């Protein structure tokens, strides 16, 4: 399978629909310092359309950086671990 060229890729989980956190963003930019988990179909849609993706933690953005440069978002990691242990 040939790797697609284009924007940097975010780590991907199996097709999980994110539960959006409705709490308002504090605006401190902390989420910009992390790598986030994104549903595969959302990442594929971003590659086709450029529409923002929603991470498991609720952050919405357009992936544009190398995810290996940042630590994993603790909220995304906790949600992913919880879903994987429940067998989703």
Image (tube, rainbow, N blue to C red):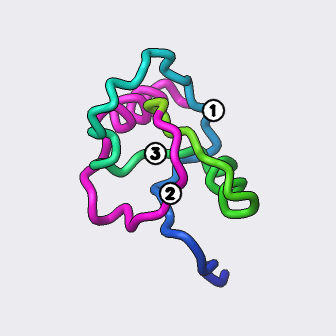
Label 1, label 3: how many angstroms apart (C-alpha)? 11 Å
Tell me where residue 51 appears, x and y as whole percent.
Answer: 68, 50
Check whether the beta carbons of the residues at disc 2 and disc 1 lie within 8 A of each other.
Answer: no
User: Which of these two is toward me, 12 or 60?
Assistant: 60
Q: Secondary structure at mark 3?
A: loop
The numbered mark, 2 or 1, whose residue comes first in the sequence reads 1
Q: Nearer the viewer, residue 24 or 75?
A: 24
> The magenta stretch spans which residues?
59-88
The residue at 48%/34% (across/down) is 56
Q: Report which residue position mark 2 lands on.
A: 63
In the visual, does 32 lie left or right of 85?
Answer: left
76 is within the stretch colored magenta: yes
Residue matched to label 1: 17
Q: Residues within 10 Å of mark 1 (few under 14, many from 20)?
A: some
Residue 34 lies, with reference to residue 69, above or below; the image says above
Picture quadrant of residue 82: top left
Q: Position of residue 85 (x, y in %)?
A: 43, 29
Per the image, label 1 sits on a secondary structure element best described as loop
Spatial CA span between label 2 and label 1: 18 Å
How many angstroms separate mark 2 from mark 3 (CA)? 11 Å
Q: Is residue 37 above or below residue 57?
A: below
Q: Are marks 1 and 3 in contact (CB under 8 Å)?
A: no
Residue ID for mark 3: 37
SS for dot 2: loop
Front-lying residue, 41 or 62:
62
Please give the name of the residue rendered at 30% of the width and 39% of the height, measured from the top-left corner: 29
Q: Residue furthest top?
A: 23
């Amino acid at each position: 399978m040939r790797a697609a060229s284009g924007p940097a890729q975010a780590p991907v989980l199996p097709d999980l629909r994110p539960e959006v956190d409705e709490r308002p963003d504090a605006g401190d930019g902390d989420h910009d310092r992390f790598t986030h988990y994104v549903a595969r179909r959302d990442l594929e849609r971003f590659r086709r359309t450029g529409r923002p993706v929603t991470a498991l933690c609720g952050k919405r953005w357009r992936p544009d950086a190398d995810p290996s440069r940042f630590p994993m978002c603790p909220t995304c990691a906790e949600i992913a671990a919880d879903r994987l242990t429940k067998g989703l």
